[in-house]
Amino acid sequence: MKLYSWNVNGIRAVANKGTFQAFLDEHQPDILCLQETKAQPDQIDLDALNAGEYHVFWNSAVKKGYSGTAIFTKTEPLQIIENFPEDIANAYELKDTYGDTNTEGRVLTAEFSDFWVVTVYTPNSKGDLSRLPMRELAWDKAFLAHIKQLEASKPVLFCGDLNVAHTEIDLANPKANVGKHGFTDEERAGFQNFLDAGLVDTFRLINPGKTEAYSWWTHWANARARNVGWRIDYWLASAALKDRIKNAQIHPDVMGSDHCPVSIDLAL
């Protein structure tokens, strides 16, 4: 089974370029998780996406043209959960001066017969780190609580734009970015908490020491062509699924967004 994750930075823009359709045709994912869709379902023509063989589920932000996640799957899921469940949302202060992150379409969960799949678009801490307190003290903890709650029933695969580079080999210029958003001690510790809780970074499982492997590049200074990037898009898996992960890749050749897709192959 081929599972892909892609921050499309606007599904309509990627579709209008034709790159989304070309990606589907070439890669044929069994499950495709999207982040930053920036659209409401009624703004999207599924026929134009060449997505006829998929069951498609959207979690759009209340604010139009902002954030949002989606899951395209060839296998119909048993259930879909939008956002954090009420008990988790009530346990953490997910609101800040920017708004309520639990209304921004950032988490979408699908249950299948023997695992859960979760796609997440983690809030950016902002250049001035003004959203870091909410991220550190509420969001990262709430998301881990959600994953552990799901794990109580069956293993979990979660993916998405986590807006953090975990270690120095996960970005091209680590020393220049220490303490900046996406590479603060707090954000990196939040990611480490996933691993400490027993989850596996699938790319590092398969490619433990691989360098110059990035999934996002700034638009500035021809960064993508020079591969001056960051690995901030991930697939993480419950330890129970570790032996079923047969491949983990980053696909920088897929254009259309400032992020590229990341994928895993899961043995059935």
Image: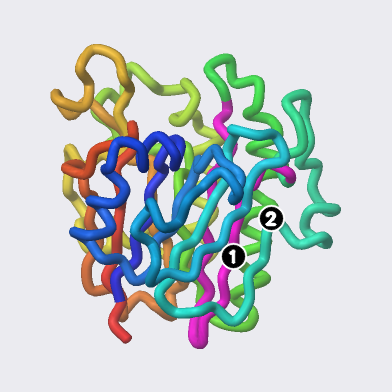
Determine the image quadrant of residue 8: top left
First in sequence: mark 2 vs mark 1: 2
Query: Which residue is located at x 33 percent, y 31 percent?
Result: 258
The residue lying toward the viewer, choosing from 138 and 18, is: 18
According to the picture, the residue beneath numbered tag 1 turns out to be 109
Tag on residue 83?
Answer: 2
The residue lying toward the viewer, choosing from 138 and 17, is: 17
Q: Quarter of the image for the C terminus: give it.
A: bottom left
Q: Position of residue 115 (x, y in %)?
A: 50, 79
- Type of amino acid at the residue the image marks with label 2: Asn
Determine the image quadrant of residue 168: top left
Vertical comparison of 169 with 251: above or below: above
Tag on residue 53?
Answer: none
Query: Which residue is located at x 45 percent, y 63 percent?
Result: 72
Q: What crowding class fits label 1: few (fewer than 14 Cα within 10 Å), some (14-19), or many (20 or more)?
A: many
Q: CA distance from mark 2 to mark 1?
A: 8 Å
- Type of amino acid at the residue the image marks with label 1: Thr
Res. 170 in view: no
Residue range in magenta is 103-125
Magenta stretch: residue 16 in it?
no
Query: Which residue is located at x 26 percent, y 66 percent?
Result: 28
93 displayed left or right of 123: right
Q: Position of residue 44 (x, y in %)?
A: 51, 47
Vertical comparison of 19 with 221: above or below: below
